Image (cartoon, rainbow, N blue to C red):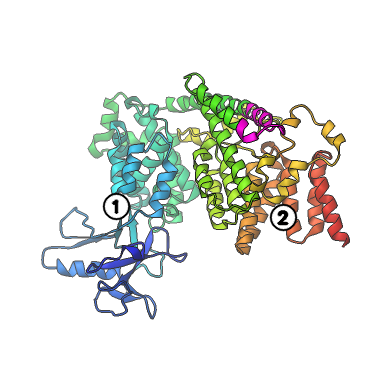
Amino acid sequence: MTDWRDWEAGMGNLLMLHDYTTPPQQYLLQVIRGDTPEPETRLCDDRYVRKDSVTVLFSSEQWKKETEYIHKDQGEITKQGPSVSIIPNWDIVNAFHVCQPLPEIQHWIERCRGRHWPPAQLLEAAWVAPSFLVPVGHHDSDFKREEWRLSPNLIERMLMFSFNMIQIKCFIVLKLIKQSLFKKMVGECITSFHCKTVMFYTIERTHPSLWMEDNLMFLILLCLQVLRKWLRLGSLPHYIIKGVNLFDGKLSVVQQRRLLQYVNFLIKNNLQDLFYINIDKLGYRLQGCGIRHIGQAGGVLRRICVNKSISLMLTFERLERFLIHLKINTYNVQNPNAFTEQNINSKLRTCFEHSRNPQLKKVALEFINHLYALRNSMQSSKCLRLRNHVFSVLIRRFKYSLNTDVASNRLKLASVLYCCGHLQAAVRVLEDVERSYHSKVKAVCGFRVIEGDRDLHVFANIISDNCDNGLYEPQFAFCVKFVREEAYCAPYILWFEMNRNMTEEEVAQRHYSDKHWMDSAEVDALPFLYYLQYLTYGGLGERDKQLHAFGILESYTCDLRNKIIMFHDETALNLLGHCYEMEGDYEGALDYYEESLSFYDTNNAANWHVQRVQRLIST
């Protein structure tokens, strides 16, 4: 059981324990009495052991020993990992059923939603599929004799059953490569489970149209390129359970390097070694299918990459144009003589009408998501301004607009949670954004343009790893924007951005397009992420994590290589300066505020910050 509320009288009750010292996927099982929901304190069973002077655990090692003893007269016993079997060539694992869905499984399901694979029906089935605890500990753990490993084997089974015929063939060939080629390099260290995991990642990120019979060798090449990527990183992540490296305890660093060299050789030589595999006469079968050379695969891959680069650039330009229209519409509904929320509702109704037109449906739905998010954020701001903290419904509504892009509305949600004091919830949202915001995410801004940020080679670089693996998942991050009606959803320092001019003359200097956004706060997603982490970790008293976020913000903002992907340098520098200010380093804060002014000396909130810090220094 995961919770005391799952206790049942007359049953054997075992409470799952997991803390920061327990490896991912591993649990300890505390023995709970069957007559009363209280911990067992006696060692009244040979399988019980003490973790400390109080806690009684159910030992996985003792469990297997008892199983072995029971079957000792029934034939030769084979032990392998969690298996204790008396049947040759069979693995038999006695396991405990987990009562409730676990966070590890729920996190995986949420990560996979919206993808072409796994299908939605499979994810729904996975939600109710039971997981098991099998008797095997982590090889590096101090409690490996007591630990139990979480096994989502029924979900993995469903994933395997969802394979089509060409995916099954690809998996079989991978196992043959493992058994005949990899075995010569690293022995039995690479297992069928490694092959299965590589297949899961490849299918998840490869377009379904590529899985055709004629592409078998090309698809095997993609799988090996996925394996090569993990070997380079030194970590093959478990497909379902986060934080588990499947190389741990299986493949040493030396073996990983040896295998990486061979996989590189295989790929560079167009998989010619496959034609010499004798198991199931694989080489003859491939030749019988008319497959002798796959030198064309590299050319096919390059053509795919060029096409995807052009497609990605067109998508970027479409999103950029979309943001321009969205901001103009947002500016128009912020008429001080009208009720803004009513104007937004009117726009939503118009978009809904357009969504019935097949040609306009996609862009209409995008507008609806963004306008809905804006209205929800404005309502949240109003609740915070009136100190009405009963707005859980508004918080829940954010989920309908979180997927507009990788980061912007998630960061708004984190900002709302921070502003209303839900710091732990804010941290979880920020951690989710940080996981999603990988190095290939492309930033998009509706107004500012960076020279060279739309060259074709930029987009080719974004998808270079994806092309290497036959994958195509372009992701974009919009700048985070707070209009004045959202002020109470934003950290106080961003209020200065909403009033960035010090004189009316500065307002007169604004270009036509500047007027659409300069009365709002707008910041690039990554600097805002690190700034919010600094605030939330500080609020929680987690000083080490706060300083880590501070250091990342400074490193990112000051790195000249990031200038081509940052649209609001001055605002990022203002956030960094404010961190220095909160640290009590006023000279450091002034340095960054003045650097911000070197980008834009007017219509820049840094002018207000400089005056404030100078007053603090003078006092």
What amino acid type should be assigned to the residue bearing mark 2? Answer: Cys
The 10 Å Cα crowd at callout 1, few under 14, some 14 to 19, many 20 or more, is some
Residue 471 in the magenta stretch? The answer is no
Query: Can you tell which quarter of the image residue 560 is in?
Result: top right
Quarter occupied by the N terminus: bottom left
| Residue type indicated by callout 1 | Pro
Q: Residue at x 86, y 39 (%)?
A: 503
Q: Is residue 546 left or right of residue 187?
A: right
Q: Which residue is mark 1?
A: 130
Dot 1: what SS?
Answer: loop
* Crowding near the residue tagged with mark 2, few <14, some 14–19, many ≥20 C-alpha atoms within 10 Å: many
Query: Which residue was labeled with disc 2?
Result: 579
Quarter of the view holding residue 586: bottom right
Residues under labels 1 and 2: Cα distance?
Answer: 47 Å
Closer to us: 541 or 556: 541
Vertical side of 320 occupied by 484: above or below: below
Q: Which residues fall within the magenta stretch?
A: 323-343
Vertical placement of residue 203 versus 318, above or below: below
Q: How many marks?
A: 2
**Residue 562 at what x, y percent from top left?**
68, 41
Between 341 and 315, which is closer to the camera in this rendering? 341
Q: Give the side of residue 351 with respect to residue 444, left or right.
A: left
Q: Is residue 325 magenta?
A: yes
Q: Are marks 1 and 2 in contact (CB under 8 Å)?
A: no
Q: Which mark is residue 285?
A: none
Can residue 558 be seen in this snapshot?
no
Q: Can you give x and y, in whole percent of width and height, for residue 339 in the image?
A: 65, 34
Q: Position of residue 512 (x, y in %)?
A: 77, 26
